Image (tube, rainbow, N blue to C red):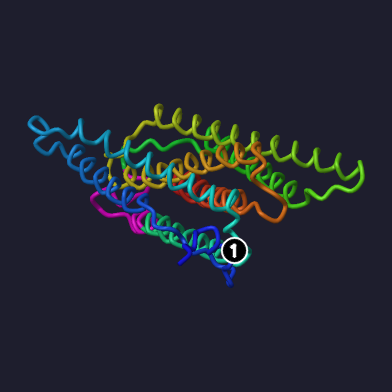
Amino acid sequence: MSTITHSSRINNQQHPFHLVKPSPWPILVAFSLVNCLLFSVLWIHEYNISSCLFLKVLPFGFLWFFFGFISWLWDIIIEATFEGHHTFAVQKGLRLGFVLFIVSEIIFFFSFFWAFFHSSVSPSIWIGAVWPPLGIQTIYPWGLPLLNTAILLSSGVTVTWAHKAIATRRYTNVTETDKRNAYNARAEVIKALTATILLGAFFTSIQLFEYQHSAFAINDGIYGSVFFMLTGFHGFHVLVGTIFLVVCLFRHLAYHFTRDHHLGLEIAIWYWHFVDVVWIFLFIFVYVWGS
């Protein structure tokens, strides 16, 4: 009896969907995240910290998380780029899944905005029945926050430029003009992604500078808690989006993307636009109206 190999099963596959192979990375990432969460909370609350090994165990949790996540991402890149499993039907499902992820992120930020509006529209007598609370020196919105707004909105323009360039790039070149246009489009994607990454790094640097020179901290009542939770989580999303775009830039340099198959870059661009929209709400309501 002849043995049916994995490659022959792929060739004989009669449907456009991807049957994912067993992988250890999801469960490794899940357990490492639980470890990071548990020991981080115990460390923050100084739970018997003098007689435990929190600071020795916690780095291993982050190490296993990054190892599992990068390995998982690399497997996905292999499936999409080298094995050709990401058909149009698979891409449609992945787009839908990422849309649902964006919806969950909207709900996540909505909860913090709810806390902000609940405290600001009807301030408690314990904070002086005013908003901002008594003793809080808010950040001037028309300084660094306005500069960061201009930077992030500019990054939205550059990342759209990258998407436009790769969506119109042709790989089936017939004439020298087509070849020259394809080369120019590739160069445009590189320039646009590089500009977006630099703008994202500038945004993060300015926000860190703003945090260092803030007159209040996260433990300064409800205002400090909500302000730093909202802006801090948004800053974390900017950092993740920047790393996402860096990966896409290296993949583009390695010729992983084509005009019809650039789902990784497309998802990164969606994520970046989501970050832009959240910041607009943050700037208008938290920095301007909330001050």
> Could you say which quadrant of the image residue 121 lies in?
bottom left
Would residue 107 be found to the left or right of residue 133 on screen? right
> Could you say which quadrant of the image residue 185 lies in?
top right
Q: Which residue is mark 1?
A: 11
Name the amino acid type tagged 1: Asn
As rendered, which of 135 and 185 lies closer to the eye? Answer: 185
Task: Tell me the residue at 66%/54% (across/down).
Answer: 261
Would residue 190 be found to the left or right of residue 60 on screen? right
Residue 141 is situated, as x and y percent measured from the top left of the image, at 51, 39
Residue furthest front as drawn = 1
Q: Residues within 10 Å of mark 1 (few under 14, many from 20)?
A: few
Residue furthest bottom as drawn = 14
As rendered, which of 168 and 177 lies closer to the eye? Answer: 177
Above or below, comparing residue 107 to residue 223 in the picture: below
Above or below, comparing residue 94 to residue 179 in the picture: below
Task: Tell me the residue at 61%/40% (across/down).
Answer: 251
Q: How many marks?
A: 1
Residue 257 is situated, as x and y percent measured from the top left of the image, at 66, 47
Above or below, comparing residue 215 to residue 156 in the picture: above
Would residue 190 be found to the left or right of residue 283 on screen? right
Above or below, comparing residue 103 to residue 217 in the picture: below
Task: Tell me the residue at 60%/36% (across/down).
Answer: 250
Judging from the image, what secondary structure is the residue with disc 1 in? helix
Would residue 56 be found to the left or right of residue 19 on screen? left
Q: Which residues are magenta?
A: 115-133
Residue 263 is situated, as x and y percent measured from the top left of the image, at 61, 54
Asked if residue 58 is among those painted magenta in the image, a careful observer would answer: no
Asked if residue 117 is among those painted magenta in the image, a careful observer would answer: yes
Task: Tell me the residue at 52%/62% (across/down).
Answer: 99
